[in-house]
Image (cartoon, rainbow, N blue to C red):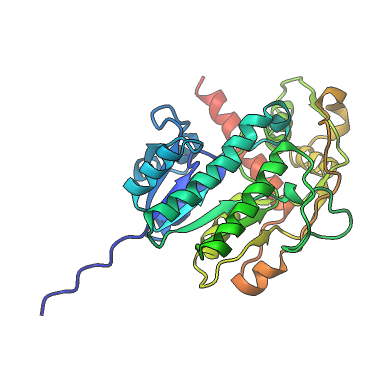
Amino acid sequence: MSEAAPAPLRRAFICGVGGQDGAYLARFLLGKGYEVVGSSRDATSMNRHGLKSLEIDGRVQVVSMAPNDFRSVLQTVTRVAPDEIYNLAGQTSVGLSFEQPVETIESIVIGVLNLLEAIRFVDRPVRLYNAGSSECFGDTGSQPATETTPFQPRSPYAVAKACAHNLVANYREAYRMHACTGILFNHESPLRPERFVTQKIVRAACRIANGSGESLSLGNLDIHRDWGWAPEYVEVMWLMLQQEQLQDYVIATGRSVSLEYFVARAFESVGLAWRQHVRLDSTLLRPSDIRYGSADPSRAARLLGWQAERQVDDVIDAMCRAAELDLRSAVTSR
């Protein structure tokens, strides 16, 4: 009797593979035995820092795709023929969305709409994960947000994410499409670019501790967020797509702290008192901001068996250790 042929690899298509979440998700899926294809607007000029840092650059095929061009999306999805699509693409900065609202809304809303339509056109059993955002809830106050909490977006970025979320839900209902959205609260890692405030804080604290003599300028320290660990959050993206009935989930640690807490903890981690090195700059304030963002991730715990293992203090410590290593490496290589 001849041996049975090995089962074909499942193929995952990650839109936005060059970002923090894309790189960690690619590593996770490769570990699960997937063939991983990623996309960027221009594959030849994509920043591959994340893939290289995780030592998977040579194992991920990257193709060019323009998310806001339906022909490009349809041709790419048809050619890649994925079993699962993870949509992590689009403009990712809340602050930048106030300066570039058109680009933000087009890249997020039109991007997800084109993917949904492409899946409908190819008529294959493709599953779609869409990256949502806790920013859609607006200010939650003292009441943690759940999957049924109404959206009250306070930025162009949040407006775009809310629209994309509703599009996914509409296609799931209207066309019985296997599509869902993860409503992720803030999640950080050493792969965060320094334009994100968490990495800006951590990197500055490490440089100051090593004698840079600089000061750190920040805006509003009285905002509260639920900060988790990005490598854990990509695991739940995959879990969501493995369910028989796809639905949306709030993904968070369940604990919110102030930005002042984050700053103080980061400077403490490198042996400094933050008040001596931080100054407030009113020009860094956003036109509108969310004071309090908190989450109830109990549905994910109950139905997916997932809950965050690392809390904010673990996240800060891990980011500080990585920043210190990078700083020492940079000094050694000079």
Farthest residue in the bottom direction? Answer: 1
- Residue 88 shows in the view: no
Farthest residue in the left direction? Answer: 1
Residue 149 located left or right of residue 299:
right
- Residue 162 shows in the view: yes
Image vertical order of residue 130 relative to residue 8, above or below: above
Residue 214 located left or right of residue 188:
right
Residue lying at 55% horizontally and 26% vertically, measured from the top left: 330
- Quadrant of the snapshot with the N terminus: bottom left
The quadrant where residue 19 appears: top right
Residue 21 in the image, given as x and y percentages of width and height: 55, 46
Residue 46 located left or right of residue 202:
left
Residue 49 in the image, given as x and y percentages of width and height: 49, 34
Residue 86 in the image, given as x and y percentages of width and height: 50, 51
Residue lying at 20% horizontally and 69% vertically, measured from the top left: 5
Residue lying at 70% horizontally and 36% vertically, measured from the top left: 202
Work out whether residue 270 or residue 230 is closer to the camera in this orientation and state it.
Answer: 230
Image vertical order of residue 301 relative to residue 238, above or below: below
The quadrant where residue 269 appears: top right
Work out whether residue 310 or residue 141 is closer to the camera in this orientation and state it.
Answer: 141
Image vertical order of residue 73 relative to residue 194, above or below: below
Work out whether residue 67 or residue 301 is closer to the camera in this orientation and state it.
Answer: 67
Residue 16 in the image, given as x and y percentages of width and height: 50, 41
Work out whether residue 113 or residue 39 is closer to the camera in this orientation and state it.
Answer: 113
Residue lying at 67% horizontally and 42% vertically, measured from the top left: 160
Farthest residue in the front direction? Answer: 174
